[in-house]
Amino acid sequence: MNSREDILSRVRANLGRTDSNALSGRTALNAYLRARPQGPRPKIDGDPVARFRAKSELLSSTVEEVSAANRVPQAVARYLAAHRLPAQAVCWPALADLPWGPSGIAVAARPATGSDLIGITGCFCALAETGTLMLCSGPDTPAATSLLPETHIAIVPAKRILIGMEEAWNLARSELGEMPRAVNFISGPSRTGDIEQTIVLGAHGPYRVHIVIVRGE
Amino acid sequence: MRVGLFVTCLVDMMRPRIGFAALKLLEAAGCEVVVPTEQTCCGQPAYNSGDREAARQLAIKLLDEFESCEYVVAPSGSCAGMIRTHYVDLAGEGEALARRMAALATRTYELTDFLVNVAKFDQVPGDYRGSITYHDSCAGLRELGVKEQPRALLAKLPGLTLNEMQGAEECCGFGGTFSVKFGELSAAIAGKKCDAILASGSDAIVGGDLGCLMNIEGKLRRMGDEKTQVLHVAEILSGTAKGAA
Amino acid sequence: MHFKARAGQKLADVLLQENLGKAKSKFVGMRAKAIVEVDAFEATREAAKSLRDRALDDLDLWLEHFEQQAARRGAVVLWARDSAEICRLVIDIARRHGVRKVTKSKSMLSEEAGLNLALEAAGIQPVETDLGEYILQINDNEAPSHIIAPVFHKSKEEISALFARTHQRPALTDIQALTREAREVLRPHFLSAEMGISGGNFLVAETGSVALVTNEGNGRMVTTLPKVHVVITGIEKVIPTLEDLSTLMRLLPRSATGQSISNYFSLLTGVRGQQESDGPEHLYFILVDNGRADMVGGEFAEMLRCIRCGACMNHCPVYQAVGGHAYGWVYPGPMGSILTPLFTGLENAIDLPQAATLCNQCGVVCPVKIPLPDLLRKLREKQVERHLRPLTERLALRVWGWVARHPRLYAISTQVAVRYLKWLAHDGDRNDRIRILGMATEWTRGRDFPAPEGKTFREMYAARKGKP
């Protein structure tokens, strides 16, 4: 008997599995998958954008808002200058057409490598409940751009700020159909508390996360 | 109210005055108190050691002795908890016995819980003068929800100040047979409890379980403290413990 | 060495005691603050318990569904009965893909299996990347002392010395600097490893995915950069839906470290798409038994609900006193005291179920409401059934039980005993005087034995009533 059969047969025996209860079990399983009930959820009142902003800042991300997408490069340029970071980044292809040049930032629309210091991404959506970005991997939304560089800049359309994870899954199901290879929820710069339970930012992922919320188009 | 007083084996052997204090309180609360004379042990040491059979026999004995009482009250969260939450488990397959155990369980109370919630007693006869800190025993707190009840009663004593210590709800390290199976570890945990007690700057440490109190007292004395009084809440409430003054 | 002897050593370890004290206040305090955000915390725990039970009660069906969904997305699902098989499967996969170096993010199962040693023996270099696990690896593969914070027991001075020795660089004292150094040392490994191994916090049956909860970014590195990704996790980790995952994610980070959400939380499904530039080309799941299948549907089945948050050990007075290494195996604290005997054999872990006061602080904080003290007591019952308890203990309990059932005998014995004890204590030199059945010396190891009043309640009550 191979391992799979060995393990499953012992599980079945311990559960008292019969053909008839397997049938009813599968019916219940499929019904549950269709129903997908949510668990108890905390009450999240007020403006989701304001909450998202407040929670993100608590997690040591920095956040600013601009009125339109074409104002993003200026905001990013100011941020980079303020932190004395180089005005050179890689970005997701969909962001390549923003007016980076006039803001003085050299942006290459290609996946990040180990030596890129700044990665600029969009997001699939964001969660107000915890101040979290949700990024879905894909040919035009490579996961490494938000991971390898020391600085991650995320552009978040205000209308994509949802209440919580449950809304995010539903949006992913309806817009993407299937789950992408990687759904990455990002809540601030990387950190570790392994040494003396002292939190340090910038473990293996980015040291800093800057979020630019875009109110308009 | 006809109350059967289960003093517990520890009180019987080590501190009878706690049994008398409980008796006095229950009578002051207007109860008719009976003390079944052949009572011994609730069976918890055997139960927690995994010897179900020994525990079961003691549970049946207690059931026979106390079944006719309207209420069963013990000055111990751990023994009351044993009866209230575990006796049904010990009844095993026998349906009739399980029903009797369940009935007994619903009528069994820790002392302060009974006084506050059943007897609705508030004319506390004690006259303790001094400051105390209160240790919440694990079984009383987590099995029976005993937390506010002793505090509500203690608050009725005008000369008494209650200082809450850090970690009042943390285990003192007694754990019944744990204290004699892992003595060093048990004493180390007791040491932390005693540090918190001493840091509270109180004249006395008070609790509802003699096992915890003996553990704490033993550790305090070994640590060189001879001043801090170690008292059962029944002693304070009944007036048999006077105070630091 | 048994738990008791190890515990004795740990109690005497001054540095460890200091570290334990610091860690306790952080974990306990932060969790307490974080759960306030959940609003209906108890209702959420109940929902978490219920969804875990839903999958466990039909574990075979949910595992099959997971397997189908995962395979549909290009993953290969393998099954391992035990540690040896886990190692064999991993090495096979590594060989098949020409893997010379493996980067690992946290996997308790790989600890169960002793995987790193097996990889090394097969000529494959494993590199731990979770900072705590990395520190242990370079310290001669020291075992972790906590399931969430593996170097809970180490001070920064110890770590500093270790880094200086291993990295051949000057010793740094600043925690930030030490972390930066680890980042620099590990980064090249992330970029060059051909295979990444991770654990799996949960397997989501609905989508055939694995959920990974991490903070450092190493979990993402290990599962994004190499061309092969292997997930090793227990069969009990399967949960039905993404909604269930969201419910558990409200409790897990808060219970573990007091965070509202972990820094990174990833749902990984299938292999890299045609035009994607990152992600593994090959994804393997190794679903592990190693003792779990036997627990299904049995007396200890509730333990399978465990989501490995570590709250139980953080709140346990025994763990707080001695730390994780005293427990002797992969899993410490209350959950370890239950799993170690079940996974490695009751006779191999005699002390563990006994080393608890049954205070139930663990049960109160467990996000999936496992009745840990009840399971510990059941293990004690099993020990008694299998005659694994010492004779003195069995005798003492039997004698006590027998005497307690004979009230007159009880009356006489206790009256004699308390007079004797009072006499013993009388001189004030009580500590080394009390030696009854060997048990009292355990008591007096660290504290005094308060003297009894000298008469029993029963005799005094009878006297007051005027009865003979």
Image (cartoon, rainbow, N blue to C red):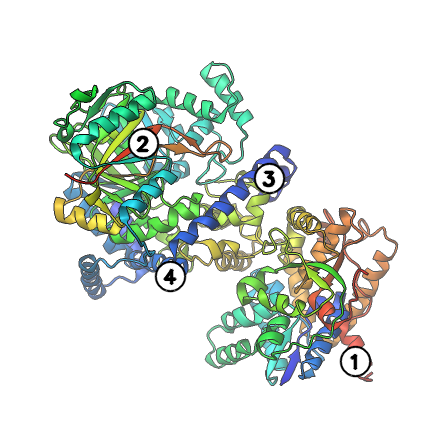
Q: What element carries label 2?
A: strand
- Gap between marks 1 and 2 measured at Cα: 77 Å
Residues marked 1 and 2, same chain: no
Q: Are marks 3 and 2 in contact (CB under 8 Å)?
A: no
Badge 3 amino acid:
Arg
Q: Which of marks 3 and 4 is in front?
A: 4
What chain letter is assigned to the residue under label 2? A
Q: Which mark is residue A209?
A: 2
Does dot 1 land on a helix, a strand or a loop?
A: helix
Image location (x, y in percent) of residue B227: 80, 53
Which of labels 1 and 3 is toward the front? 1
* Residue A99, quarter of picture: top left
Q: In which quarter of the image is residue B144?
A: bottom right
Same subunit, labels 4 and 1: the answer reads yes
Identity, as a three-letter code, of the amino acid under mark 4 = Ala
Percent across and percent down for residue C174 are 50, 24
Tag 3 and tag 2 share a subunit: no
Question: Quick one: which residue is furthest to the right in this view?
Answer: C427
Question: Which label belongs to residue C43?
Answer: 4
Disc ID at residue C199: none
